[in-house]
Amino acid sequence: MISRPVFSYTIASRLIDTAAFMGTSRRNDVERIGKSSRGGVIVSERISRMPRYSPFIDGLLSDSSLLQKHRPTESANPATAIRIRKATDTELTGGKEITSETLFPLVRGGLLYAVDAIDESHRIAQQFGDETRSHWQGMIHRRKGDFDNARYWFRRVGSHPVFGELHHAAAGVSPDMAKQSSWDPYLFVGLCEREKFGDDHHRGELIKLQRIEFDALFDYVWRKSFG
């Protein structure tokens, strides 16, 4: 018996953000696009866009200039990085009660990562050692062009709870990732390494994957920080 694919709101919302990142105008009603696990069918429906995090974070993540560099050497928006650094926990949460004091700092670290403040994000990711922080460190080292270290941290992750949903989203923009049975961080590292050394055929695809990966991990960190 073939189970029917479940198209979760978290997947849909990440794909909405990716569409915004790719230049789609923001509007109340947006196109929800998801990749089904049966035969590569594309499922679309109209849904209303609702705030997903806090006003501070929703506004920041709506910036279409985020995550457009694979290997940033400086913050894409220093003023925004300062805002993130100075924001109180209440501003970040929108008043929600934090239930994971160890994981919540990655919310700030993730926002710094999104504006290419890589070193600051790295310092936060190093504070504790679990699979989610290890994955963030792998992402950071990949963007630093430190590919062997990226692979080391992804080995420490093994499998992550978000990989299944992440693969659904990634398969819609990457033929290489669609061939895999799940999200493959090593494949992504390898493609980025090839791009660094002159193979730029996949550059657009890699930029999309980078945003999809961020959206999925950030969403996971947010949810786990509150429940």
Image (tube, helix red, strand yellow):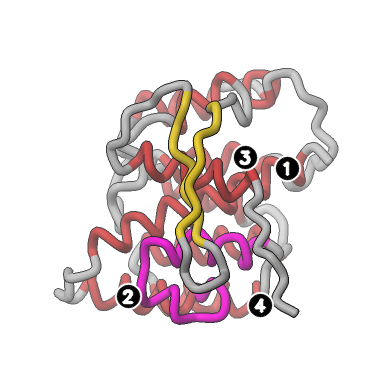
Q: Is residue 47 left or right of residue 92?
A: left
Q: Earlier in the sequence, mark 1 or mark 2?
A: 2
Specify the quadrant that holds the C terminus.
Answer: top right
Sequence order check, earlier mark of 4 and 1: 4
Three-letter amino acid code of the residue under disc 2: Leu
Real-space Cα separation, disc 3 to disc 2, in angstroms: 27 Å
Question: Which secondary structure, mark 2?
Answer: helix
Amino acid type, callout 3: Val
Considering only vertical position in the picture, is 194 above or below 42? below
- Tags 3 and 2 in contact by the CB under 8 Å rule? no
Cα distance between the residues tagged 1 and 2: 30 Å
Mark 1 neighbour class, 10 Å CA radius: few under 14, some 14 to 19, many 20 or more: few
In the image, which disc is placed on residue 107?
3
Residue 70's image quarter? bottom left
How far apart are the two marked residues, 3 and 4, measured between alpha carbons? 22 Å
Distance in Å between CA atoms under marks 4 and 1: 21 Å
Say what secondary structure mark 4 lies in: loop
Q: Which residues are magenta?
A: 162-184
Q: Residue beneath label 1, please? A: 223
